Amino acid sequence: MVSEFEDMDRQVGLMAPSSSTSVIAPPVNRNMPAVGSVAKYRKDLVQEYHGGVTSLVERLRSSDNNDAQAIIVTLINEVFQETNNLLGNHLIATENGELRDASVISFKRAEVLEKAIKAIQSKYLLEKESGIDIDSPSMTVVFRFFMSKAKAVFQRMEMPDEQIDLFFSNFGDMMENWKKELREEFEMLKAK
C-alpha cells in the first residue's frame, strides 16, 4: 500500500522512504471486510459511533435539544472528539517513527483546534447577542438561588413538608426541557 507521501515523493522524483525499517504498527482489525463491502462496513461503524443513528445530522435531529445553541455545543464537542482522534493518530505515527506523517497530523490537529476556538468565540458572540448564556454554570447558581428562596417562602407560610416536596417534584417535571423552552422565549422576545 503506497502512502500519500510516497506517491508525492515519486511524482517529484524523490525516492520513497524505505519500508524495511522495523516499526510498531497499530492493531489490524481482523473483521475488516473485503474491498467490495468497505462502504457498508464504514457505514456500520459510523452508525455504531453515533449510537444507532446513521449520521451526525440524524443524531442532531433526533436529539431533544435541537435548538441552535444546543446544536452548536454538540458540534463543538464533536470537533474536540476529532482532535482526540488526530492526537491518537499523531502518537501512533510518532511511535512508528513516521515523523513526516506525525508532523502533518499535528498540523491538522492544530488547524482543527483553531477552528474549534473560532466556533467557541462565535458561540459566545451569539450568546452575547441573545443576552444570556443558559449553559453557563452561573445560570445554575441563579436557578438554585430562586428555588431556595421559594422553599423559604413556603416554610414561612408554614406549608407542610409534603406539599413543599410535591411542589418541587412537579416543578422538576415541568422544568425537564427548561433550557430549550427558555431559549425559545428569548427568540420570541428578540422577534418582537
Image: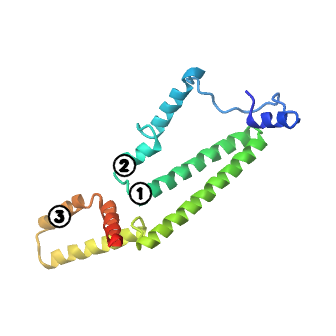
Give the residue type that dot 3 points to.
Answer: Asp
**Percent position of residue 21, x then y:** 82, 31
Whole-number angstrom distance, CA of label 1 to CA of label 3: 31 Å
Quarter holding the N terminus is top right
Look at the numbered disc 2 and give the secondary structure of its residue: loop
Q: Residues within 10 Å of mark 2 (few under 14, many from 20)?
A: few
Whole-number angstrom distance, CA of label 2 to CA of label 1: 9 Å
Q: How many marks?
A: 3
Of the two numbered discs 2 and 1 on the same chain, state the one appearing first in sequence: 2
Q: Residues within 10 Å of mark 1 (few under 14, many from 20)?
A: some
**Percent position of residue 76, x then y:** 51, 55
Look at the numbered disc 1 and give the secondary structure of its residue: helix
Give the residue type that dot 2 points to.
Answer: Ser
Of the two numbered discs 1 and 3 on the same chain, state the one appearing first in sequence: 1
| Looking at the image, residue 135 lies above or below residue 35 | below
Pointer 1 residue: 70
Cβ–Cβ under 8 Å for marks 2 and 1: yes
Pointer 3 residue: 165
Pointer 2 residue: 63
At 77% from the left and 37% from the top, the residue drawn is 5
Quarter holding the C terminus is bottom left
Give the residue type that dot 1 points to.
Answer: Ala
